[in-house]
Image (tube, grey):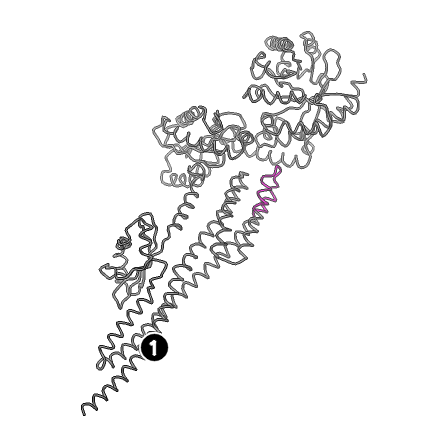
């Protein structure tokens, strides 16, 4: 009986064991499937969706920064902003290709933005910028940016929805896992009386399998499991690799535990609805992202760790470049504006001065040495300026900024009076004038500066920067080293900008004209030459050269205009030669034009193109140009002398240079400034000066041209002094080309 009962019990136990085994197997399969799904969704969330969402944010910021650089290009015509745009554009192209954030539409939209930006840059860098077209190009660029921003926003919404769906799916899987656990627990409770040991063994095995399934040893990211007492009960191979990369002993697993781990664990335990926490922490030089979750059944915490050091480094670099100049490491214009705004808000009564300065004749420096070498010079100059700040005697604070490719700024505060502000600026100018040793030799860098201050003149940060920049423009135009802002300067600046815009249109619309004033031999009364003079026919009116020539000089338009003058003068001289009249034409060469590296080639090409003998072209430079950087001037003049063109010093007497000193220059003529001729008969000093110039010039084998001769008594006195050539209203006003040709015919015929 007992044996029958035992056999029956064994049979029933076997059946129950089979049922239990079947239930265990069914639940194991379901649990493995559920856990795998959770693991897959969680990994996708941590490794893909969330980082991609962050990267999309960075992508949108980069697109916005590209748009800002193009607006800066439009506002300043400074090509460095386009260089910054290209750098950002390369980064965004690389981002789209590597990160796979979108489809081919992103590539197309970025290509459109790049194309419109190229067209804008070409327009802005063109000598005759079409501003209406520039605004239209900016509008298209804004549309391109808006399209890209909208696409990124849509993709961010999609990723956010994916994240929410994944979280809901994980929660559903967890709920399903709990249901399976309840079913299994009921089955175990029923069977436990008959096969407790087997069930316990099975549960232990199932639990172990579940843990191994959830935390595979081959997970590429570090995974830790800790108890409520921070005892590490599980770690994978990636943990040891991370410790080695951080320079720590691999066996020191506790070093991976964040300092605030207990804080986040307590938050999870106190809030039942809070299943996990996500935070960043440091491990030596590593930036780590930790995701911590609580497993109720085991009373343990799972830590998933990701190394985000490269991402953090990239973020820090972008943040630095947003506020600092990449080459000099100095704070930039964006940083200056932000600091000024903050300071004005916090201390609205405290006086703050701003001095904006740049190297004099910066464009000539670039033309002579190239952008790369000039950038190197600027880098060395910035180091010099940093060291000079410590030498300036001032009780307040001074900060140095680089606000554009060519301009620097000093923020000076607090100061007691504008006089003290000027003294600080003058100290910097004086110390900066010392020769600068560079990789390309020694440079004597002269600065020009504009100054304004808050709150007496400026009302906000943008206004202060504008005022100081306007004062700098005035310093450039007036050839001064330091100019303090005055409210009238904004009007003058606007007038210059208006004049520059009109002058650009005048060039495009062929409104510029060449007039010719004859130069007469004082002995024979015959024409022996003429001076080409630039005129601007603006509608029915003639614009005075006194108004537009300085604007052309400052804006650089004088280079384009000067080349046109050379071409037209050669054409007129060739026409006269073909008509049997060899009349030399004198061309005024401005200071900026004289320093342009292409001047020699321009004149040589024009002579060759018109097959004109070089002696029929004469170049006039002012006395001040001849006296500045004499070694360089002498080298250029010697090249022109070898070419065969005539050379003369214009407006002589206004620069107070020595006649004897001029003998080193290979010039043929001196032109006495009209201011001495006009007053010669009334002012004995002027008469003596004119007589002396004529006598010494002849001794130096130079011809003398008297400008501004208007009366017969002036003619008679100049004859007595032995002057060679006359030019003035006594013989003729400046004439348009057709009238000048008639004058030549009439004079030579008589």
Membership of 124 in magenta stretch: yes
Closer to the camera in the image, 47 or 488: 47
Residue drawn at x 33%, y 64% as measured from the top left? 215
254 left or right, relative to 457: left
Answer whether residue 291 is visible to the viewer in this image. Answer: no
Position of residue 741 measured from the top left corner of the image (x, y, whole percent) = 77, 24
Position of residue 540 measured from the top left corner of the image (x, y, whole percent) = 69, 32
Residue drawn at x 37%, y 30% as measured from the top left? 415
Q: Is residue 428 above or below residue 143?
A: above
Q: Is residue 639 above or below residue 275?
A: above
Residue drawn at x 26%, y 67% as measured from the top left? 298
Q: Main secondary structure of the magenta part?
A: helix
Closer to the camera in the image, 643 or 133: 643
100 left or right, relative to 566: left
What residue is disc 1 on? 26
Q: Quadrant of the C terminus?
A: top right
Position of residue 255 measured from the top left corner of the image (x, y, whole percent) = 27, 53
250 left or right, relative to 527: left
Residue farthest along the front direction in this orientation: 3
Name the quadrant containing residue 135: top right
Closer to the camera in the image, 357 or 56: 56
Membership of 471 in magenta stretch: no
Answer whether residue 51 is visible to the viewer in this image. Answer: yes
Specify the segment rendered in magenta: 117-138
Position of residue 749 measured from the top left corner of the image (x, y, whole percent) = 81, 18
Q: Is residue 383 above or below residue 156?
A: above
Residue farthest along the left direction in this orientation: 2
Name the quadrant containing residue 602: top right
Dot 1 falls on a residue whose secondary structure is helix
Name the quadrant containing residue 219: bottom left
């Amino acid at each position: 009986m007992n044996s029958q009962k035992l056999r029956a019990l064994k049979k029933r136990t076997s059946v129950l064991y089979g049922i239990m085994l079947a239930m265990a197997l069914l639940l194991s399969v379901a649990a493995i499937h559920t856990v795998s799904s959770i693991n897959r969704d969680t990994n996708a969330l941590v490794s893909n969706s969330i980082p991609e969402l962050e990267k999309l944010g960075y992508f949108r910021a980069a697109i916005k920064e590209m748009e800002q650089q193009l607006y800066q290009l439009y506002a300043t015509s400074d090509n460095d902003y386009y260089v910054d745009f290209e750098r950002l554009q390369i980064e965004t192209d690389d981002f789209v290709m590597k990160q796979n954030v979108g489809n081919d539409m992103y590539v197309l939209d970025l290509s459109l933005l790049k194309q419109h930006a190229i067209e804008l840059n070409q327009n802005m860098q063109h000598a005759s910028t079409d501003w209406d077209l520039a605004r239209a190009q900016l509008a298209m660029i804004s549309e391109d940016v808006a399209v890209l921003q909208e696409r990124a926003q849509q993709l961010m919404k999609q990723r956010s929805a994916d994240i929410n769906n994944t979280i809901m799916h994980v929660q559903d899987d967890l709920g399903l896992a709990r249901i399976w656990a309840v079913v299994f627990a009921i089955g175990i409770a029923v069977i436990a009386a008959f096969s407790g040991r087997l069930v316990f063994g099975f549960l232990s095995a199932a639990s172990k399998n579940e843990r191994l399934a959830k935390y595979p040893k081959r997970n590429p990211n570090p995974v830790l499991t800790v108890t409520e007492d921070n005892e590490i009960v599980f770690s994978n191979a990636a943990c040891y690799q991370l410790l080695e990369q951080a320079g720590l002993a691999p066996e020191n697993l506790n070093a991976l535990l964040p300092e605030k781990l207990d804080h986040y664990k307590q938050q999870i335990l106190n809030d039942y609805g809070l299943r996990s926490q996500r935070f960043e922490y440091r491990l030596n030089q590593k930036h780590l992202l930790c995701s911590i979750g609580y497993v109720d059944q085991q009373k343990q915490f799972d830590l998933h760790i990701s190394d985000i050091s490269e991402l953090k480094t990239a973020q820090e670099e972008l943040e630095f470049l947003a506020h600092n100049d990449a080459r000099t490491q100095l704070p930039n214009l964006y940083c200056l504006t932000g600091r000024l705004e903050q300071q004005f808000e916090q201390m609205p009564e405290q006086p703050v001065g701003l001095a904006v300065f740049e190297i004099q004749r910066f464009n000539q420096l670039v033309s002579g040495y190239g952008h790369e070498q000039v950038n190197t010079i600027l880098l060395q100059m910035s180091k010099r300026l940093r060291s000079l700040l410590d030498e300036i005697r001032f009780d307040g604070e001074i900060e140095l900024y680089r606000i554009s490719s060519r301009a620097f700024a000093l923020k000076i505060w607090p100061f007691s009076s504008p006089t003290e502000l000027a003294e600080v600026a003058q100290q910097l100018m004086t110390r900066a004038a010392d020769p600068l040793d560079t990789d390309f030799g020694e440079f004597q860098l002269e600065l020009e500066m504009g100054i304004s201050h808050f709150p007496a003149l400026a009302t906000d940060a943008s206004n202060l920067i504008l005022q100081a920049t306007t004062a700098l423009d005035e310093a450039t135009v007036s050839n001064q080293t330091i100019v303090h802002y005055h409210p009238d300067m904004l009007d003058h600046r606007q007038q210059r900008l208006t004049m520059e815009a009109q002058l650009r249109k005048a060039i495009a619309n062929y409104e510029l004209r060449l007039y010719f004033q004859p130069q007469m031999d004082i002995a024979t009364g015959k024409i022996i030459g003429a001076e080409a003079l630039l005129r601007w026919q603006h509608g029915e009116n003639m614009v005075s050269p006194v108004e537009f020539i300085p604007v052309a000089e400052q804006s650089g338009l004088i280079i384009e205009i000067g080349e046109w003058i050379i071409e037209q003068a050669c054409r007129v001289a060739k026409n006269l030669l073909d008509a049997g009249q060899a009349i030399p034409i004198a061309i005024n060469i401005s200071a900026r034009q004289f320093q342009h590296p292409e001047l020699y080639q321009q004149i040589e090409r024009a002579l060759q193109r018109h097959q004109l003998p070089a002696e029929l072209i004469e170049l006039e430079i002012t006395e001040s140009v001849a006296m500045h950087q004499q070694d360089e001037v002498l080298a250029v003049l010697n090249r022109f002398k070898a070419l065969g063109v005539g050379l003369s010093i214009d407006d002589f007497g206004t620069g107070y240079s020595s006649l004897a000193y001029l003998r080193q220059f290979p010039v043929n003529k001196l032109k006495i400034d009209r201011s001495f001729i006009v007053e010669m008969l009334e002012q004995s000093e002027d008469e003596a000066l004119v007589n002396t110039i004529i006598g010494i010039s002849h001794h130096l084998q130079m011809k003398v041209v008297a400008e501004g001769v208007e009366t017969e008594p002036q003619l008679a006195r100049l004859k007595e002094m032995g002057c060679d050539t006359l030019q003035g209203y006594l013989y003729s006003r400046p004439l348009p080309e057709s009238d000048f040709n008639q004058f030549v015919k009439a004079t030579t015929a008589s």
